[in-house]
Image (cartoon, rainbow, N blue to C red):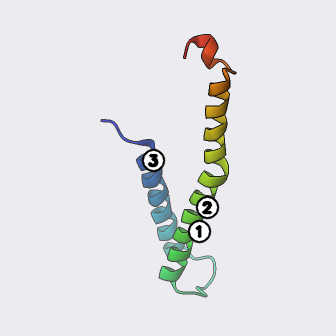
Amino acid sequence: MNVAPDTVRLVAFLSLLAVLYAAESLWPVRPWSSPRPRRLLLHLVLALVNTVLLRLTVATPLALLTVYVNRQGWGLAPLLGL
C-alpha cells in the first residue's frame, strides 16, 4: 500500500482537529463567546492560509535554489554521480 505523504498529513491534521474539537466540547475552559461552527471554519481558513503562505515563502524558493545548485554542479550530487 502506497500512500502519499500529503494524504497522511491531511488525515493527521483532520484527526487531531476532530479530537481537539471533541475535547473542547467535553471540557470547556470558559463559556462560548462565538458560535462553534464559525470558530471551526475560522480555524480551517487559518490553517489553509498558513499552508499556502509556507509553501510560497519556504518551499518554492528552496526548490528553486535546489535547481540552481544542481545546474551549477555544486554540492554532493555531482560527486555521487546523481
- Picture residue at 45% right of the left edge, 64% below the top: 18
Mark drawn on residue 59: none
Q: Farthest residue toward the left?
A: 1
Q: Earlier in the sequence, mark 2 or mark 3?
A: 3
Mark drawn on residue 50: 2
Residue type at mark 1: give it: Leu
Q: Are marks 1 and 2 in contact (CB under 8 Å)?
A: yes
Query: How much space separates mark 2 and mark 3, taking CA atoms?
Result: 15 Å
Where does the image place residue 39, in percent across and percent down from the top left?
A: 54, 78
- Image quadrant holding the C terminus, namely top right
Residue type at mark 2: give it: Asn
Where does the image place residue 12, in percent across and percent down from the top left?
A: 46, 52
Q: Which residue is mark 3?
A: 6
CA neighbours of label 3 inside 10 A, class few (<14), some (14 to 19), many (20+): few
| Front one among 29 and 17 | 17
SS under mark 2: helix
- Residue 15: name its quadrant: bottom left
Q: Earlier in the sequence, mark 1 or mark 3?
A: 3
Where does the image place residue 49, in percent across and percent down from the top left?
A: 59, 65
- Picture residue at 52% right of the left edge, 86% below the top: 35
Residue type at mark 3: give it: Asp
- Picture residue at 57% right of the left edge, 87% below the top: 34
- Image quadrant holding the N terminus, namely top left
Residue 30's place in the image compared with 45, above or below, is below
Where does the image place residue 44, in percent across and percent down from the top left?
A: 52, 69
SS under mark 3: helix
Query: How much space separates mark 1 and mark 3, taking CA atoms?
Result: 18 Å
Residue 57's place in the image compared with 79, above or below, is below
